[in-house]
Amino acid sequence: MSLFSFSPRVGRMGLPFWELEKMRDHMETIYNTLSGGVSQVKKNYTGVFPLVNLSEDDDHLYLTAELPGAAADQLEVSIKGDTLSLRGEVPASQLGEEINYHRKERESGSFRRILALPVKVEVDSIDATFKNGILTLTLPKAAEAKARHVTIKTE
């Protein structure tokens, strides 16, 4: 497979950035190999954070977000129209200034994630829980967004 081949995982607009990240990872691997496996190069790439799953059934949307190290009082969820905003902060681990990282992949710092919801929801009835670093939102669908069954009359 060539370095610049298309991957079905990435949409057309994300392809150039994915390819640059792939090339950077390849160069980092070469550097690590030549330097004996210990790299002082800091990876500055920031991925999408937090990772979320959004699913639905007939009556609700369900959103889960992975937020390891976050505290519930540092999170804010807001909804305007069909847009959900998740904002907060994950503190960096404090191991001391003498520590040199070989790899640092866990996200930390402030974040804001905005998601377009597929349907309108009843904002006043949202249930939010935070347990073991997982934020779970249960969002009841608005009445106009729920499927309605039509009775067919016969003559």
Image: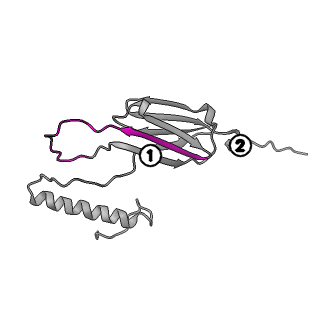
State the residue at coordinates (18%, 59%). 29
Contact (Cβ within 8 Å) of mark 1 with mark 2: no
In the orientation shown, which residue stands out farthest toward the left? Answer: 36
Q: Earlier in the sequence, mark 1 or mark 2?
A: 1
Q: How many marks?
A: 2
Residue type, numbered disc 2: Glu
Vertical comparison of 40 with 14: above or below: above
Give the residue at x 51% y 38%.
77
Residues drawn in magenta? 82-104
Compared across the picture, whether 130 is left or right of 25 comes to right
Q: Which residue is mark 1?
A: 112
State whether the magenta stretch is mostly helix, strand or loop.
loop
Residue, disc 2: 144
- Locate residue 94, reporting x and y percent: 23, 35
Residue drawn where x is 16% and y is 40% of the image: 97
Disc 1 secondary structure class: strand
Numbered label attached to residue 48: none
**Amino acid beneath label 1:** Arg
Q: Which image quarter is the N terminus in?
A: bottom left
The quarter holding residue 120 reads top right
Q: Is residue 131 above or below residue 59?
A: above
Q: Nearer the viewer, residue 11 or 50?
A: 50
Determine if residue 50 is in view. no
